[in-house]
Image (cartoon, helix red, strand yellow):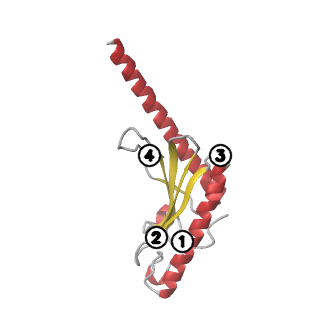
Amino acid sequence: MKLKRDYGNPDSGGGIDAYTESGNARKEEFLRDAAKYLRAIGKELAKSGLTEQDVMRPNRGGIAVSGEVYGEFRAPGEDIGVSVEMSSTCIMNLSGRRDGATIRAVWRCRRRERAHTPEGPNRWVNPNGTAAGAAAEIIGILQEGRRQMWREAKDREAVAIDSVTA
């Protein structure tokens, strides 16, 4: 599955907004399509074991913005997962689309023992491809996070050993 079309508003420079009735209709259509696309990405991610999903948390936003659709994906029993957001940005060159549609993915670790939740940097996923292609990019982002958390655990282990032997 791919996004159906470019939802840019020709009356307001190409972005997705609800300043007019037709713009609002495009915005609502974008949010529905983004939700379908995110569900399709979720189905692809499930093939890689990311079956715990919290998909379809839309935020319609105000009149001047596209709104966004969020999803969280993780493997059962694993503390690290990936947060995915579909929205539109005024930085059109992030997506190569007139409407500025983007997919932002961030790996996140849910740690219960401390307030700070480690997370990776924003990563931009190609919104012009298929859900399978986007899922493959997202899996790579999650792998980055797993490697980072593994390195941090090894560093903590080394510090603990050093403190015992000192």
Whether residue 91 is visible here, answered yes or no, is yes
Check whether the beta carbons of the residues at disc 1 and disc 2 lie within 8 A of each other. Answer: yes
Please say if 93 is above or below 24.
Answer: above
Q: Would you name the residue on which mark 2 appears?
A: 67
Disc nearer the start of the sequence (4/3): 3
For the residue marked with disc 2, what is the amino acid?
A: Gly
- Circle 1 or circle 4, nearest the eye: 1
Disc nearer the start of the sequence (4/2): 2
For the residue marked with disc 1, what is the amino acid?
A: Leu
Please say if 149 is above or below 37.
Answer: above
Residue placed furthest toward the left:
166
Query: Regarding mark 1 in the picture, which secondary structure is present there?
Result: helix
Residue placed furthest toward the bottom:
21
Residue placed furthest toward the top:
165
Q: Quadrant of residue 75?
A: top right
Q: Would you name the residue on which mark 1 appears?
A: 31
Would you say 50 lies left or right of 100 here?
right
Circle on res. 120: 4
Q: State the quadrant of the N terminus.
A: bottom right
Circle on res. 48: 3
In three-dimensional space, the C-alpha distance between marks 3 and 1, rounded to whole angstroms, equals: 26 Å
Disc nearer the start of the sequence (3/1): 1
In three-dimensional space, the C-alpha distance between marks 1 and 2, rounded to whole angstroms, equals: 7 Å
Check whether the beta carbons of the residues at disc 3 and disc 1 lie within 8 A of each other. Answer: no
In three-dimensional space, the C-alpha distance between marks 4 and 3, rounded to whole angstroms, equals: 20 Å
Q: How many labels sit on residues?
A: 4
Crowding near the residue tagged with mark 2, few <14, some 14–19, many ≥20 C-alpha atoms within 10 Å:
many
Residue occupying image coordinates x 65% and y 46%: 48
